Amino acid sequence: MRWGIGVILLLMPALIASSGCQKKTKESEAEEKKVQLMKEPYKNEEFAAGTYAQVLIYDKGHGDADFDVVKNQLNELAAKFEVYEQGESEFDRINAQAGIKPVKVSKVTFELAEALQKYGKSSDGYYNPTVGVMTQLWHIGFSSGQVPSDELVKATLDKVNIDDIVLNAKDQTVFLKKKGMMIEADGIGKGFIAERLLKTLKDQGVTTAVVNLGGHAYTMGKNPNHKNGKWEVGIANPQLGENQDSPLVGVLTSRHTRFDTTNYYGRYLKAGDKIYSHLFDTKTGYPMETDLLSVTMVGDNPTYDDAYSNVLMNMGLEKGMKFVNDHDEIDAVFVTKSKEVHISEHIPGEFELLDKSFKVVEGVAKK
């Protein structure tokens, strides 16, 4: 089985306790009586649907029942979007009928296909959901991964084209124009699913929570452990050979609620002395080369932020930083292969460097 959105990325929510006093209105005091938030959340962690999943709930009186609902929803959505060797999902059926006929899909799968097409077209080619034929050929991150021949690589190029996705809203169908094409959700899948899990938690009466899917953290409500309600997220060491137990590069404190990291070594293939990333240059068919190790994008739209963390990685430092600084609604922290940290201009003073082997060379960090 291949899980199209299950890349394990090293980003974990770090909740640090603090206290503060604020003037309260009668309305806010009444609301606080209804909703009691805990400093230590209820926690559920497991390997579900091919990815590490963690849910934290801060509302007192919530817990197991909410976790069960979210877990079931996660598994149901994954079953529609995964790309299985057995060909069991709706995405598998779309791919199997590529170049043959449109495939009618469920409402939620059609919504995801719309999002894939939208961000594929709006990103100027830096994100392309039809990359599936390339990822399948290389199989990077799996035991069967190998460097294919140049001939095979070139044969994938005409099967990777965002304009070859045809959506019919009336019939709720998805069609890939060419045989051999493959669409996959890797790149926005976690954000798309997290958006729906958070809505479910809200419908269950939860007001404050964190959903972490494979290292992408999505929050709801204000952090009860921070005087300003901001969330604090640890940015892990993205270097090759590091893991979740490695020291953090730093901690980002933000008013935003969505934190998406794309890591160059999230999955990789080592062949001789060469390391190939799981991220592809769809113009060449080969894994991309970049000056970046990781990009942590910070915003408030789960699907958009998930997509554009990949886009920024593909853009590289210079173009990526310009894009972020031109968009007030998002922030980002870039970590380069030369161990430099670059911070977008909208979040000065909100990043604290912990690993002194790295150096902040752009933007302002806490002293």
Image (tube, grey):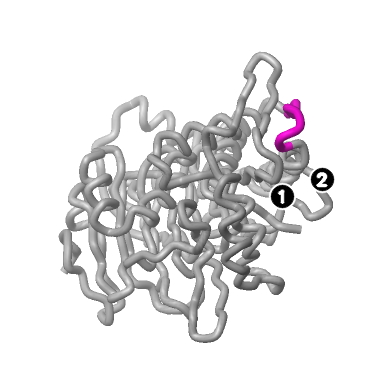
- Asked if the magenta segment contains residue 103, the reply would be yes
Question: At 28% from the left edge and 76% from the top edge, which residue is drawn?
Answer: 338
Q: Is residue 85 shown above or below 358?
A: above
Look at the numbered discs 1 and 2 and tell me whether their residues touch, using CB distance below 8 Å.
no
Which residue does the numbered mark 2 point to in the structure image?
88
Q: Tag 1: residue type?
A: Val
What secondary structure prevails in the magenta region?
loop
- Asked if the magenta segment contains residue 281, the reply would be no
Residue 189 visible in rendering: no
Please state the horizontal and vertical placement of residue 18, each as a whole percent of the image. Answer: 32, 58
In depth, the one of 67 and 199 nearer the eye is 199
Q: Tag 2: residue type?
A: Glu
Can you tell which mark lies on residue 154? none
In depth, the one of 213 and 16 nearer the eye is 213
The magenta segment:
98-105
Q: Is mark 1 on a helix, strand or loop?
A: loop
Question: At 27% from the left edge and 82% from the top edge, which residue is drawn?
Answer: 357
